Each structure stands twice: as C-alpha cells, then as structure tokens.
C-alpha cells in the first residue's frame, strides 16, 4: 500500500492506494471517522463491493443509499434521494458519508455531504480508474444541469481517500480506457516524464498489470495533490487540471451526458486543446500528433460529434473558467506544461471549433 497526503495547510488528508483495502478493517477503522455511517453507492457497484466494505466496519451503525447508475443521474434530484436517506436514517452532524463507486457516486456523495446539515464528513472510496486518479481527490463535488456540466456544486474535501486497486479487476474495458485519459492529462499538463512513461507502458496498463496501475495511480494522485495544495479553490493554477475539459464538457452537455463517458469526452477535448495550441504556435504539430497517437493506442475516441461550432461555443461560455464574459482556456506550451490564458487569437479558436465540430 502507498499512502500520500493532500496538504492544504488548514487540513491534511491521506490517500491510500493498494490492493485489499476494502477488507482491511484496521485501515478503515483508522480512516473513517464517526460511529454513524451512510454508504452511498449505485446499483452496479453495491452488489460487487458493498458487503465487503460492510464486513470491515464492525461496531459502526451503517446505513446505505443505492443510486441509479450513470452520468445522466448526476442531478440535483438524485442528490435529493441522498438527503432523504440521511434524514430517514436520522443521521446527525457527526455522521460520515462513505462514497463507494466511480466519479458519479463520488461527486454526488461529496455534494450531499457538503450540504447536509451544512457539512458532514465524507470518505471517498473510488472504484473506477478515473475516480482513483482524479475525482476522489481534491474536494470538487457537484451535479450537472441540463445547461452545463457540474454547474451546481461545492468544494468539500474528503476526510480520506481509500483506493482499493482490486476493484479495478471488475471494471469494463471502456471505463478503464476512460480513466487512462485523465492519466494522460497529467502527463500533458505537468509531467513530460509521465507522458514518456505512458508511451512505453500503455500496453501494461491496458493489460491491467497491477504494478503499472499502482504506479500510474500514485503518480497521478501525487501530481493532483500538489496542484490542489497550491490552489484549493481554483483561483489560478488548479485550472490546469481542466485541460481538455472545456471542450469535453461541451461535448458531454450537447449529447445529454449519454453518448460519451467523461474520460472519452476529455480525450477528444485534449486533442482539440492541443490542436489549438499548435495553431497558435505554442507547441509544434509533432507534440499534438504524439498526444493523438497515445489516445488512439489507448482505444479512446479522437473524433468530436458534429454538434456545430456555434453550439460548442455557446456551451463553452458556461464554463467555470469564464471571467467577465472572457473564456479562459487551458493550452499547452510544451508536452508537459499547461498555461491558462484568455489571450488567444479568436480566429484560431473558431478555426479549431469548425474543424472538429462541423
Ligand atoms: P462513473 O462513476 O459513471 O463509473 C463508470 C461506470 O463504472 C459506472 O457504470 C459504474 O457503476 C461502474 N463501476 C464503478 N466501479 C466499478 C467497478 N469496480 N467494477 C465494475 N463497474 C464499476 O464514471 P467515472 O468515470 O468514474 O467518473 C466520471 C465522473 O467523475 C463524471 O461525472 C465527472 O464529471 C466526474 N469527475 C469529477 C472530478 C472531480 O474533481 N470531482 C474529476 C474528474 C471527473
Ligand atoms: N478535475 C479537475 C479538478 O479537480 O480541479
């Protein structure tokens, strides 16, 4: 097991990564505060892992709330069912919500924990690669709105993150690939060495080699923890974690959160951002081509849906990086270094959007 920490100054929490953690009663006892727990999971993950988790929590009063599966359920209405469960189980402010599942369960559970009685503790137990490398860490929680992705939410740091890598054995291939997209993201934005490592070790990750997966998860969490420690509330540098997301979120919203997995939309979004970076002369075409080749080898989509450049632009204006009407974009000035800027040639953006979305 590897243990990393997210150090925010005012608080610090552990991220444990390794096999067998759901069966480690001693670890769970140390990491999950409180006597009263609500485990939030979904109809897919609960039958696989809820009992294993429950058995490792002797002496606790454990309630559960099982949600429908899918991004289209990441809504205020679904968050409402978690509030209903908390109230029905008469949970108090010292209760802990344990989110067992992928990023959808984690974002919903974290959001409910942020709101319930103005904030209860939340422990993230991520079971997808994407959630283990990204969404469980850093305290962004929330739900979607038909008008845009993650428009309603709160910052609410977890008390702990427990990433049991054994859970990845049951993950469908498509979901594994979607998680790889977020790992590629870290290589693009802040670690050229990780990008090189991915180019060499991608076959091991696709074959679910445990050592390779643990290495990639730990490297990703280390990078994310360091960015979040510098800018918890996304005042500046944290925005780089959104590389590919402005375009990706537009793709997800335009297709009603049903056609593309989040990681797939991010993969296409990263290509669009790299294309624009090359068009603006920030990176050379060869760097963009390396990114495309890696994503293709990972089995990720590289073509955007034909939603039209205007529709994409309208949806992008709802991005949380818009300031005073100006859309800030996360671009690359090297493979391994991202920049956030509102100072770009509009015609280059229009040309990129037209090429990808027409
Ligand atoms: P997901 O939560 O929908 O999980 C993917 C699928 O895998 C679901 O069908 C789920 O039920 C299933 N599943 C989960 N664990 C499994 C397992 N071990 N075995 C078999 N099936 C399993 O999707 P995701 O990719 O984990 O997360 C995407 C969400 O995360 C998006 O809503 C995205 O916006 C959000 N996100 C949030 C942050 C953040 O910082 N909060 C960062 C990145 C992404
Ligand atoms: N996934 C973007 C962030 O956590 O800031």
Image (cartoon, rainbow, N blue to C red):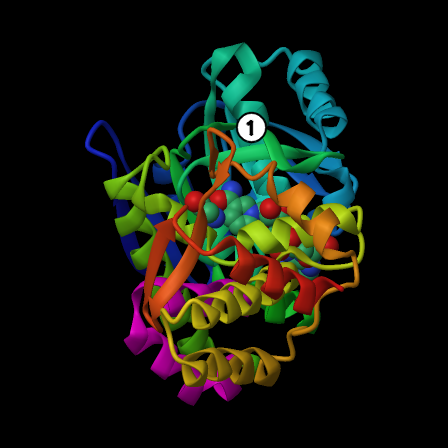
The answer to which image quadrant residue 298 occupies is bottom right
The x and y percentages for residue 175 are 66, 65
Quick check: is the Cβ at mark 1 less than 8 Å away from ligand 1? Answer: no
Report if residue 194 lies within the magenta region. yes
Viewer-closest of 36 and 279: 279
Residue 267 in the figure: left or right of residue 202 = right
Is residue 168 placed above or below 9 in the rendered structure?
below
Q: Residue at x 56, y 50 (%)?
A: 246
Viewer-closest of 109 and 307: 307
Residue identified by numbered label 1: 153
Q: Does the rendering let one see residue 176? A: yes
Q: Residue at x 45, y 64 (%)?
A: 185
Q: Residue at x 71, y 55 (%)?
A: 309
Position of the C terminus, as image quadrant, is: bottom right
Residue 251 in the figure: left or right of residue 26 = right
Position of the N terminus, as image quadrant, is: bottom left
Magenta stretch prevailing secondary structure: helix
The x and y percentages for residue 347 are 55, 58
Is residue 238 placed above or below 263 in the rendered structure?
above
Viewer-closest of 249 and 33: 249
Is residue 194 placed above or below 73 in the rendered structure?
below
The answer to which image quadrant residue 300 occupies is bottom right
Residue 349 in the figure: left or right of residue 80 = left
Is residue 160 placed above or below 312 in the rendered structure?
above
Q: Residues within 10 Å of mark 1 (few under 14, many from 20)?
A: some
The x and y percentages for residue 277 are 44, 67
- The magenta region covers 180-205
Q: Residue at x 79, y 63 (%)?
A: 306
Q: Residue furthest left?
A: 9
The x and y percentages for residue 53 are 56, 45
Q: Does the rendering let one see residue 101? A: no
């Amino acid at each position: 097991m590897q243990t990393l920490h997210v150090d925010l100054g005012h608080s610090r929490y552990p991220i444990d990564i390794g096999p067998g953690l759901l069966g480690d009663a001693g670890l769970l006892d140390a990491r999950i505060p409180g006597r009263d727990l609500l485990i939030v999971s979904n109809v897919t993950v609960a039958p696989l892992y809820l009992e294993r988790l429950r058995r490792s929590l002797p002496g606790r009063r454990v309630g559960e709330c099982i949600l429908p599966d899918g991004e289209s359920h990441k809504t205020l209405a679904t968050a409402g069912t978690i509030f209903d469960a908390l109230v029905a189980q008469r949970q108090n402010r010292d209760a802990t919500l344990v989110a067992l599942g992928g990023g959808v369960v984690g974002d919903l559970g974290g959001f409910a924990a942020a709101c319930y009685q103005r904030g209860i503790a939340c422990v993230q137990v991520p079971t997808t690669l994407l959630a283990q490398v990204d969404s469980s860490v850093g305290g962004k929680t929330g739900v979607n709105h038909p008008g845009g992705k993650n428009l309603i939410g709160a910052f609410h740091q977890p008390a702990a993150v427990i990433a049991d890598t054994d859970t990845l054995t049951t993950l469908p291939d498509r979901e594994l690939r979607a998680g790889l997209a977020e790992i590629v993201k870290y290589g693009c934005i802040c670690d050229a060495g990780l990008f090189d490592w991915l180019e060499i070790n991608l076959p091991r990750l696709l074959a679910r080699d445990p050592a390779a997966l643990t290495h990639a998860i730990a490297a990703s969490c280390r990078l994310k923890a360091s960015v979040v420690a510098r800018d918890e509330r996304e005042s500046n540098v944290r925005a780089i974690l959104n590389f590919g997301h402005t375009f990706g979120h537009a793709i997800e919203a335009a297709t009603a959160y049903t056609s593309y997995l989040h990681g797939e939309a991010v993969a296409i979004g990263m290509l669009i951002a790299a294309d624009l970076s090359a068009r603006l002369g920030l990176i050379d075409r060869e760097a963009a081509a390396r990114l495309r080749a890696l994503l293709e080898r990972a089995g990720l989509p590289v073509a955007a849906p034909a939603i039209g450049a205007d529709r994409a632009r309208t949806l992008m204006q709802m991005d949380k990086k818009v300031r005073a009407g100006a859309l800030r974009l996360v671009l690359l000035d090297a493979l391994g270094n991202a920049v956030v800027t509102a100072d770009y040639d509009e015609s280059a953006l229009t040309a990129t959007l037209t090429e990808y979305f027409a």
